[in-house]
Amino acid sequence: METHHAVLALVALVSLVMTVRAVIAGLSGNFGTVGRQVGVGGVIFAFGVALYRNWDSVG
């Protein structure tokens, strides 16, 4: 597996974990945690996808 594919897989895994945590927090009524998980997970996912798409130009 090439490095940029491994990075994309890791980003997808982290995003999945953060989504599961947000769902669990939502079910227990912790809406501040839901917002935090969605916000941070979204930033991580967007950064990872951008890094994957621009892998050759980054270095």
Image (cartoon, grey):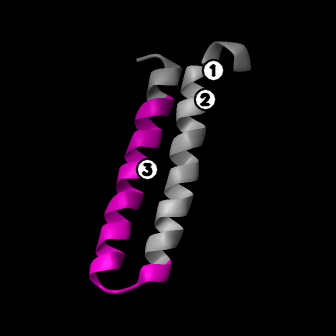
Q: Residue visible at 63% across and 20% down?
A: 54
Give SS at disc 1. loop
Asked which quadrant contains residue 47, the reply is: top right
Mark sitting earlier along the chain (3/2): 3
Tell me if mark 2 has few (under 14), some (14-19) or many (20+) residues whose alpha carbon lies within 10 angstroms of its own.
Answer: some
Q: Residue visible at 58% across and 50% down?
A: 43
- The numbered disc on residue 54 is 1
Placement of the N terminus among the 4 image quadrants: top left
Q: Position of residue 58 (x, y in %)?
A: 72, 20
Give the mark count: 3
Mark sitting earlier along the chain (1/3): 3
* Residues rendered magenta in the picture: 7-32
- The numbered disc on residue 14 is 3
- The numbered disc on residue 44 is none
Residue 59 appears in the rendering: no
Q: Position of residue 25 (x, y in %)?
A: 35, 77
Q: Amino acid at mark 3?
A: Val
Tell me if mark 3 has few (under 14), some (14-19) or many (20+) residues whose alpha carbon lies within 10 angstroms of its own.
Answer: some
Side (left or right) of 25 relative to 8: left
Majority SS type along the magenta span: helix
Residue 36 appears in the rendering: yes
Placement of the C terminus among the 4 image quadrants: top right
Return the residue at label 2: 51
